[in-house]
Image (spheres, rainbow, N blue to C red):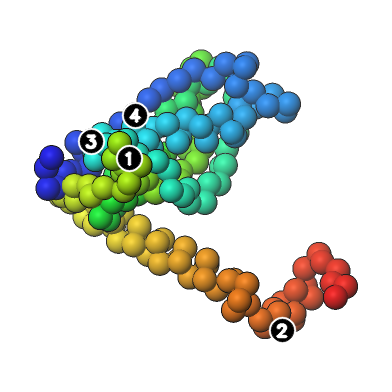
Amino acid sequence: MSTFKTAKESRLSITELMLPSHSNFGGKVHGGHILNLMDQIAFACASKHSQRYCVTASVNKVDFLSPIEVGELVTLKASINYTGRTSMVVGVRVESENITTGKTKHCNSSYFTMVAKDTDGKSVPIPGLLVTDKQGIRRFARSIQRKEQATQRSTRFDASKFKVDDYMTSLEKENIKIAL
């Protein structure tokens, strides 16, 4: 296994036609179907980089920016943005294309943290990321910041440390009725 690999070595894209079976009750492509495709391409990209079976550890925020119509082509693009010791962040971008007009739109992007596993299910070291341009440095640095923010979010509201009084004033502006 290589010590370092470029993002280009594991970059993937897939294109799929959206069928009526992919639609929700509103007639648009179901967000769950898109999330499933995103997870699949993140798995494939991470497994290609690590040459191991990978599992999804977390998914960063997913904003659905534009609805996808039945009959459109959806293209998902995945690339390694960050590597840790056993984990990696895969950036996934989703675009749709109207096949009759050729118009494309960015539908969503997200970041999947994937962990490489051995046959016993134990986390294993992966190749590092060889960055060859400023865009790669930006993506790697942004992934570090996203990781730090996630840690702060999870510890800030830990039940043993949470102080209700610190939030009572800000809750007054919200659609909440508190009856303690």
Eye-nearest disc, 3 or 2: 3
Q: Residue at x 54, y 20 (%)?
A: 18
Horizontal side of residue 85 vs 100, given as left or right:
left
Q: Earlier in the sequence, mark 3 or mark 2?
A: 3
Q: Which residue is mark 4?
A: 13
Q: Is residue 147 visible?
A: yes
Horizontal side of residue 19 vs 131, given as left or right:
right
**Label 2, residues with CA under 10 Å away: few <14, some 14-19, many ≥20:** few
Eye-nearest disc, 4 or 3: 3
**Label 3, residues with CA under 10 Å away: few <14, some 14-19, many ≥20:** some
Q: Residue at the front extreme? A: 120
Within the image, what quadrant is residue 177 found in?
bottom right
Q: Which residue is mark 3?
A: 51
Label 4 element class:
strand
Q: Is residue 38 above or below residue 170?
A: above
- Asked whether the residues under the numbered discs 3 and 2 touch, taking CB atoms below 8 Å apart as contact, a structural biologist would say no
Label 3 element class:
loop
Distance (Cα) linking label 4 and label 3: 18 Å
Q: Earlier in the sequence, mark 2 or mark 1?
A: 1
